[in-house]
Image (spheres, helix red, strand yellow):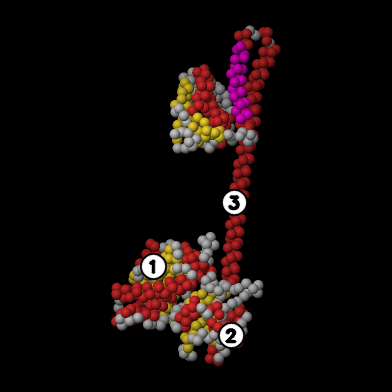
Amino acid sequence: MEEKYLQFQIFNSIPIGICIINTNFQIIFWNKQLEIWTNIHSNDIVGKNLFESFSHLNSPRYIIPISSVLDGGPPVVFSTQLHKSFFPSYLPNMQPRLLHTTVSHCTCPLLNENFAVISVEDYTYLSYRIKEHKRMRDQALQEVERRKKAEEDLRKSEAQLRELNATKDKFFSIIAHDLKNPIGAFKNVLELLYENFDEFSKEEILEFIEPLKESSTQLFSLLENLLIWARAQTGRIQLEFVEFNLINLIENNVSLLKLQAENKQIQLLTEIPEKLMVFADLNSINTVIRNLISNALKFTYPGGKITVSAKEQDDFALVCVEDTGMGMNEETKSKLFRIDAHHTSLGTNQEKGTGLGLIICKEFVEANGGKIWVESEEGKGSKFFFTVPLAKTHND
Amino acid sequence: MEITSEHIDVIQEMINIGVGQAANLLNSLSGKHVKLSVPIVQIITPEQLLDFFKNHSVLDNLSSVTLTFSGPLSGSSKLIFSTESASKLVMAFTDQTQDELDFDEIQAETLSEIGNIVLNSLVGSLANLLNINLNYSIPLYLTGTIDQILSADLSFKDDGIILLARTHFSIESLAIEGDFILFIDLKSVPDFVKSLDKFIQEGGFFTK
């Protein structure tokens, strides 16, 4: 190194790489940090031409900006993402170092010379730390996601268990009360008749049997619902989706229940179009219609009226069973379709129920892709609505 | 001594020449067709500068590159982007995808280079055409609010002259906007005006 340049040795004690070139692109100083990073000793490089020593820099992309700096122009930055390292340098594991380089102008008044100072900063560890930080952040995010999912699964599983438990409770409650009591009454009446048969007149026997007949009809209906529900719970009901005319189904149910309505002096009317093709499982929708009309019959006073209507609404058929019966308050409404909220009411003729019918209705309507809801006012009657998806092609 | 509309026309023209140089350099750096434009240069007060950023930019999240200069003309030049625009710009140059791009020091370093090229060309063009030699500091990268960015710049004072121009980068189908600010220290204004007058008297761009 020329003696006049010894003043640059101050740059040997700083932790960034410094290379100084003169206006002939000749390297006049190469600091210790660069010796360490490049394994090139100062004695082997000082005095040599920059572009001859580092041939990858011998391109207009580097020559033009470096020349501009030597002419007194603004400093130039060479970032690690857009350039190869100015001076090749490797880590012990042979990975290249990421060196950020700035070339700036320097005038030395004492020497009356212009220089370009090439300062090099090592971004390798910074880059490594950023990558490591991102990797850890991504891992943490994945872990958070995993935990969220696990919590969600746990919540779902807990809800399922709660529902299963409620189902089991409902099942035992029906067996304990709704089946045991009427069968117990059957047993008592039959025992009384059996033991004292000769003591009763025909008329008296008929008096004993008549309530049994009514009760057995209700019991049969309950058993039927219980079986359907039990099969639905164990997943043994396979829904078979077909296109059918919903109006036929409504008319069939109305004519089947007409006699029961007349017996209770209730008008059972329909407001329906001729045809309303739906795409659903026929048997389950049949159960829903029968249950809703039976329910309306149970809660309507003699002299009242039940109207079954149906119409198209958007992509669904909307069915409404409206009665002029006893209606419900908000609390009763909120318990209607819930398996976990035990609710039964006596009918207008003290008909017993289990609340199972509406739960079945909800399960079936939803399994068919529809919705079920109720509008009701205590003392004024109720309107039960449900929707069934329309058939795509047959309602034109 | 005031900067007149004629001076602004000259500055605008000088900056346009610098813009051409910057676009060429960015083209060769990225290997892509980069279009760069600085449509209108205007002189504004510091309050107007703050209002401009309040109205046009995301105030809390700005990335800037600053090049400070001294000598016959002293002040600083800045290129300011919203961090989102800065990310897009770096993405266009480095072929990264949006998912990978998470603005960090390495990307900031790349933005420093891109900003430095633009600032060097714009300020360099001014210095060359006015035939003045400037001393430049190392480019400084900063993020923060406009207040933080301005207060971190020691050369930026309330009583200087601020020239503001919005820059448009078009890189293939991507359109990115940043703001170029040239701040001239009040003490330098008379010399700056003299240099501009001299340039005009000597025949302006016709003799260059």
The secondary structure that most of the magenta stretch takes on is helix
Name the chain under label 3: A
- Which three-letter amino acid code belongs to the residue tagged 1? Arg
In percent of width and height, residue B49 lies at 37, 67
Q: CA distance from mark 1 to mark 3?
A: 45 Å
Circle 2/circle 3 CB separation < 8 Å: no
Number of numbered callouts drawn: 3
Residue that badge 3 annotates: A148
Task: Give the vertical position of B188 relative to A276 (above or below).
Answer: below
Circle 1/circle 3 CB separation < 8 Å: no
Residue at 47%, 79% in the rendered image: A64
Residue at 64%, 73% in the rendered image: A94
Residue that badge 2 annotates: A45
In the rendered image, residue A212 lying in the magenta stretch gets the answer: yes
In percent of width and height, residue A257 lies at 52, 22
In percent of width and height, residue B6 lies at 29, 75
In the rendered structure, find residue B166 and report the number of the disc placed on it: 1
Name the quarter where the N terminus of chain A is drawn. Answer: bottom right
Mark in the foreground, 2 or 1 = 2
Residue at 46%, 90% in the rendered image: A112
Q: Give A3 or A163, whichever is nearer the viewer.
A: A3
Name the quarter where the C terminus of chain A is drawn. Answer: top left
Q: The residue tagged with tag 2: helix, strand or loop?
A: helix
Q: Residue furthest right?
A: A195
Report the magenta residues as a range.
A206-228
- Which three-letter amino acid code belongs to the residue tagged 3? Lys
Q: The residue tagged with tag 3: helix, strand or loop?
A: helix
Label 2 vs 3, first from the N-terminus: 2
In the rendered structure, find residue B96 and report the number of the disc placed on it: none
How packed is label 2: few (under 14 Cα within 10 Å), some, or many (20 or more)? some
